[in-house]
Image: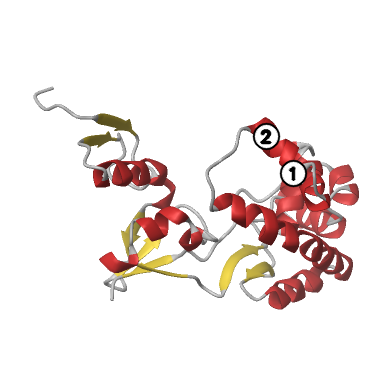
Amino acid sequence: MPDEYDGIILGTGHNSLVLQAYMARSGLRVLAVDRAPAPGGGLATIENPRVPGFRHNTHSFFHRALTSMPWYRDLELERHGARYIEPELNVALILPDGRSLEWWTNFEKTAESFGEFSKRDAATLRRWVEEFRPIVERILIPEAQSPPLPPEQRQGLLGRSRLGRRLLEVAALSLWSLWCENSSTMSFVPAFCSSMDCARSTCGLGDLAILFRRSWPGGTWPKCAWAVPPTWRRP
């Protein structure tokens, strides 16, 4: 290569771009390469042809807590003209009969949507949120703001508190159980268990899991969830 670089980054997803930005701010010459036509990976955005000036994410639903990340502040994205707008309706899983299970920024609206399908599952959702809110506030959010610890050290620190031990307990669950717990606790995209034992005994969302499986054509699971995408807007 005719030019010399201090570093070459393979891929231009958002993690790579953040790394490149930090390296460039440190005075390093960096090259990032990707086979994709546009950079950004899971955070790539395209302009909405119907609403000029608005850029929509094409990959996933709203990126919760992204604006609270240290790199978002360090790189001063808003000073450069970007503003991240969170829609009140984050995610909607739409059924063939027209009904939908909705995730809102307002938890009461989310619980009401659950209640339209199952009062029992709505109560379960409230119980999980009540239990895990202090874990998110006292453990997960501070961890997101701090350098990562070696797994053994992190596990030892978590084992010293009741909340930490509960987090470790949930983290040790099976893959399907973990999806169930997270979907009900943190309002992520629903990934209902294919195992009815998991649905009944682990996260407690048995009614919804059975309902969605039976209501989908052929008794299979929906391939994806329709989501309200985040929007980048330049003032």
| Residue at x 71% of width, y 52% of height | 182
Q: Is residue 51 above or below residue 188?
A: below
Task: Decide: is 74 above or below 24.
Answer: below
Q: Is residue 194 visible?
A: no
Res. 134 image quadrant: bottom right
How is this picture coloured?
Answer: secondary structure
Rendered-image quadrant of the C terminus: bottom left
Mark closest to the chain's N terminus, 1 or 2 = 2
Q: Position of residue 213 (x, y in %)?
A: 77, 52
Residue 144 at least partly seen: yes
Crowding near the residue tagged with mark 2, few <14, some 14–19, many ≥20 C-alpha atoms within 10 Å:
few
Crowd around label 1: few <14 · some 14–19 · many ≥20 (10 Å): some
Residue at (76, 76) in percent of width and height: 112
Q: Where is residue 180 in the image (x, y as percent from the top left)?
A: 76, 50
> Looking at the picture, does residue 115 appear above or below residue 56?
below
Q: Distance between the residues labelled 1 and 2?
A: 9 Å
- Amino acid on which disc 2 is placed: Gln
Q: Mark 1 points at which residue?
A: 158
Q: Position of residue 13 (x, y in %)?
A: 38, 43
Q: Which mark is drawn over residue 153?
A: 2
The quadrant in which the N terminus is found is: top left
Tell me the SS state at disc 2: helix
* Quarter holding residue 111: bottom right
Circle 1: element type: helix
Please tell me which residue lies in front, 32 or 201. 32
Residues 131 and 41: in front is: 131
**CB atoms at circles 1 and 2 under 8 Å apart?**
no
- Image position of 61 (left or right of 216): left
Residue name at image x 15 percent, y 26 percent: 4
Q: Which amino acid does label 1 sit on?
A: Leu
Across and down, in percent, residue 62 comes to 51, 62
Q: In this view, does 29 lie above or below 136?
A: above
